[in-house]
């Protein structure tokens, strides 16, 4: 069980000026390699990838890239940097995920601010973005998109950044999450093309759209309780009900009245729910082109539905 985390746009917390870490990690003779070894040792029992986490953490604190840290000795850390490093290590040992400790994470070659109000972006979701971009490039006249459950905004912002004439609506039921998403959209200069709305699924959405994309909560409830993310990330963004399809069912049933002819739906799924999601989609949308696509590990991860034009 991790300790409770304050939910705030002021995340991550800052070191108080008079803080005194118990152990000074900074030594004049330290190189990046020896510093990495020290951090790695401290994280060994708390991380599935202690070396990678150490490399990312030290790079974030020192301002150095991974390649720089590997290839060249790192400069001696300042007192402030050393204090920040000690606090970050303690947070990781307390079970706080690295992206929350850093307060940001990379997704689709963009950097996003994160707080514990939003889900940590996953590589699997980059695959969803790639599928959507392929469809948009093949359908250049389809340029209106709705994303349901935007969280940090990483999907909508990545799409807007890649397709300059795309107009989006991005919704979420969490006001704090929408604050994070708006911050990220402003950071990447696409806020003028994304309308962020505090909505539950399609509530208050009246304008017809060409494209629906969503990474809805999809982990089956019993499965979720056995996963580490259950203790560290917002359950609101993870729990897909007993079969993992609770929200996906609602979206599939309501989507028809919101989509233009020739439009499409792209959804991310739990890897164990592909067959049941496909069967459900065929039941709701008979005679429509419906496909499952796999992620990089070969798991059924994405459901696509092409509406007849």
Image (spheres, helix red, strand yellow):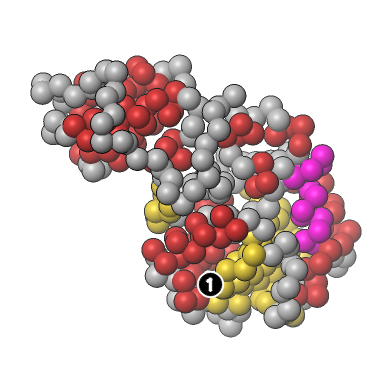
Left-right relation of 88 to 155: left
Q: Is residue 42 magenta?
A: no
Q: Is residue 248 magenta?
A: yes
Task: Give the magenta range.
Answer: 240-252
**What residue is disc 1 on?**
194
Snapshot quadrant of residue 150: bottom right
Residue 198 image position (x, y, % from top left): 64, 65
Q: Nearer the viewer, residue 107 or 201?
A: 201
Residue at 62% across / 42% down in the picture?
234
Residue 12 image position (x, y, % from top left): 41, 43
Left-right relation of 306 to 85: right
Q: Is residue 136 visible?
A: no
Q: Residue furthest left?
A: 28
Q: Is residue 3 visible?
A: yes
Q: Is residue 100 above or below residue 9?
A: above
Q: Nearer the viewer, residue 75 or 277?
A: 75
Badge 1 density bin: few <14, some 14–19, many ≥20, Cα 10 Å? many
Q: Is residue 232 above or below residue 48?
A: below
């Amino acid at each position: 069980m991790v300790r409770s985390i304050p939910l705030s746009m002021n995340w991550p917390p800052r070191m108080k000026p008079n803080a005194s870490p118990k152990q000074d990690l900074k030594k004049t003779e330290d190189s990046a390699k020896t510093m990495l070894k020290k951090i790695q040792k401290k994280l060994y029992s708390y991380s599935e990838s202690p070396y990678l986490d150490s490399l990312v953490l030290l790079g974030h604190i020192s301002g150095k890239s991974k390649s720089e840290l590997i290839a060249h000795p790192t400069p001696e850390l300042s007192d402030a940097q050393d204090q920040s490093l000690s606090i970050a290590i303690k947070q990781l040992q307390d079970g706080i995920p690295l992206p929350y400790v850093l307060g940001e994470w990379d997704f689709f070659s963009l950097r996003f601010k994160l707080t514990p109000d939003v889900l940590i972006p996953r590589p699997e979701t980059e695959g969803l973005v790639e599928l959507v971009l392929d469809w948009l490039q093949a359908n250049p006249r389809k340029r209106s998109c709705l994303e349901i459950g935007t969280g940090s905004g990483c999907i909508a912002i990545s799409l807007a950044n890649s397709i300059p004439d795309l107009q989006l609506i991005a919704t979420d039921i969490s006001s704090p999450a929408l604050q994070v998403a708006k911050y990220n959209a402003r950071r990447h200069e696409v806020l003028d093309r994304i309308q962020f709305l505090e909505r539950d699924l399609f509530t208050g959405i009246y304008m017809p759209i060409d494209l629906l994309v969503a990474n809805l909560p999809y982990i089956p409830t019993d499965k979720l309780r056995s996963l580490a993310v259950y203790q560290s990330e917002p359950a609101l963004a993870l729990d897909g009900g007993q079969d993992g399809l609770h929200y996906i069912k609602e979206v599939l049933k309501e989507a028809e009245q919101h989509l233009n002819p020739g439009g499409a739906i792209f959804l991310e799924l739990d890897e164990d729910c592909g067959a049941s999601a496909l069967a459900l989609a065929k039941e709701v949308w008979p005679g429509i082109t419906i496909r499952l696509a796999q992620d990089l590990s070969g798991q059924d991860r994405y459901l696509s539905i092409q509406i007849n034009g």
